[in-house]
Amino acid sequence: LREVAARVITTQIVSALRHLADQPQPIMRCDPKPGSILLHSELPSRLEVTVADFGRSKAVAQTAGADEPCVELPSPGTGTLRHLPPECFEPAPPIDATVAIWAAGIVFYRMLDGRRPLVEGETQSRIGHERLVVHRARQLEFAERSAVSPQAEDAIRRCLSYRAADRPDIIALSGDAYVRPKKRSRSTAERPST
């Protein structure tokens, strides 16, 4: 997709994740992926995004003293392996909402580049057995011919930080100047070209 369209979609994904995090009992959406992102429009001038498929979501309670609510995955690599961060390949990993930040970064990258970062062409089985994400996560590259802006590349790199602690939390990401929605009047809002 052109960056303007990918940015609009990513902004709405981040907004949906923020909405889930703002609930009295936060909902952790573990691995948003292209198949669970529905695009629709009632008006020709406005594209809207719905995040669906909450099979891997968890309602979590804030733990006293913890910065982020955490849950434990039932087993390593639970979920869509192409969209999981390195920590999800560890035995019984405790995970927090930065798992969804990683997945949103993967989706944003895929919209801009057309390829899956780190594991393009690999099978789910090989990704899991050889822990390819763990071994390749520090080697994120963009195609030389890429027309991705430095701002988009920076946003993706922050979302795909190897360590969960280095990724922005949902509040920081939703307030980021590149990711937050631009205020536009309804009459001048244009649907992005894809």
Image (cartoon, grey):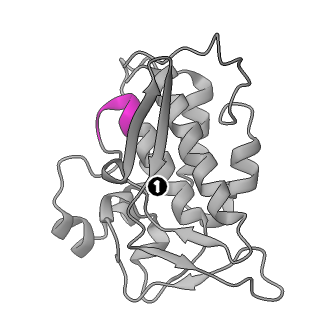
Q: Is residue 94 visible?
A: yes
Horizontal relation, residue 96 to residue 185: left or right: left
Looking at the picture, does residue 168 appear above or below residue 49?
Answer: below
Dominant secondary-structure state across the stretch colored magenta: helix
Q: Position of residue 158 (x, y in %)?
A: 61, 46
Please state, as top left, top right, bottom left or bottom right, where the C terminus lies in the image. top left
Q: What stretch is highlighted in magenta?
A: 110-115
173 and 93: which one is in front? 173
Residue 150, image x, y percentages: 59, 24
Inspect the image, locate mark 1, and give the three-letter code of the amino acid beneath it: Ala
Closest to the observer, 90 or 23:
23
Left or right, residue 25 beside residue 83: right
Q: In which quarter of the image is residue 164?
A: bottom right
Q: Does the magenta stretch include residue 112?
A: yes
**Residue beneath the point at 18% across and 55% down:** 122
What is the x, y in percent for residue 86? 45, 67
**For the N terminus, which image quadrant?**
top left
Q: Which residue is label 1 attached to?
A: 103
Label 1 secondary element? helix
Residue 114 lies, with reference to residue 193, above or below; the image says below
User: From the viewer's perspective, is residue 116 above or below residue 72?
Assistant: above
Q: Residue furthest top?
A: 188
How many numbered discs? Answer: 1
- The residue most toward the front is 42
Question: Is 124 part of what is drawn in magenta?
Answer: no
* Residue 180 figure quarter: top right
Residue located at (53% from left, 65% from top)? 99
Residue drawn at x 43%, y 63% is 31
Give the residue drawn at x 51%, y 20%.
4
Q: Position of residue 185 (x, y in %)?
A: 71, 17
